Image: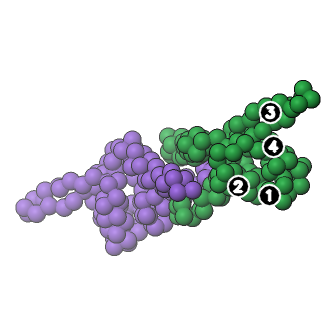
Chain colours: A purple, B green
């Protein structure tokens, strides 16, 4: 548990709030944290996580925008391509989260100046 | 207001929790923040703040232990002395508080390592 001003927080609350994730987004993040070396299409994720494609697409979009996923193109035989996704390094994600937390804390500093 | 993990905090909650102060202790702190240049005996503080001496003594002891007050001896004509107190620099108090807040935040860092 994490303490802030005599209130307790679970780590997943901090992560969800920090990245602005809904429950489904966080589930995808947890899944990918356990499968850090693989590249996935949204179709593959929908299948293995047993969720509908539009839910996965929404979550993948959000995690990609939050700089948690990296994206690549996989060429198809017909000349087209599909996107594949892989979670970024844990150290990168950790750094992003700590930046967000430090931004929250910066407010204490600012308010103390006007105290 | 200060945000942490989508919960809001008032600055005085953060200060009170960080320094482990009760309401009466915090009132004394606020009073002394407005009278930063003066030295006081506990008797003087009890009189001007209209509180009983033992309450003030308890709060002064706590703020002194928390490194918020500095103490000096004032010699009396009869050879004895009394203690006088003055609030420390605001920059010092701010630094102390930010150290405490950074200690709370360090827990996020530690828990992320085991995530």
Q: Position of residue A28 (x, y in %)?
A: 42, 60
Residue toward you, A113 or A105: A113
Label 4 chain ID? B
Q: Which labelled disc corresponds to residue B31?
A: 2
Label 2: which secondary element: helix
Q: CA distance from mark 3 to mark 1?
A: 21 Å
Q: Position of residue A2 (x, y in %)?
A: 60, 50
Q: Mark 3 or mark 1, which is nearer to you?
A: 3
- Give the residue pinned by disc 4: B41
Neighbourhood count class around disc 2 (C-alpha, 10 Å): few under 14, some 14–19, many 20 upward: some
- Give the residue pinned by disc 1: B49
Residue at 38% x, 71% y: name it: A55
Pointer 2 with pointer 1, Cβ within 8 A: yes
Q: CA distance from mark 2 to mark 4?
A: 14 Å
Pointer 3 with pointer 4, Cβ within 8 A: yes
Q: Position of residue B34 (x, y in %)?
A: 65, 54
Label 3 chain ID? B
């Amino acid at each position: 548990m994490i303490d802030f001003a005599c209130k307790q927080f679970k780590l997943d609350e901090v992560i969800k709030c920090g990245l602005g994730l809904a429950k489904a987004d966080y589930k995808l993040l947890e899944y990918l944290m356990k499968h850090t070396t693989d590249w996935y299409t949204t179709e593959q994720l929908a299948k293995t996580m047993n969720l509908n494609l539009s839910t996965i697409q929404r979550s993948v979009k959000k995690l990609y925008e939050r700089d948690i996923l990296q994206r690549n193109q996989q060429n198809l035989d017909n000349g087209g391509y599909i996107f594949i996704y892989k979670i970024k390094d844990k150290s990168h994600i950790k750094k992003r989260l700590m930046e967000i937390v430090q931004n929250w804390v910066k407010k204490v500093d600012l308010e103390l100046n006007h105290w």
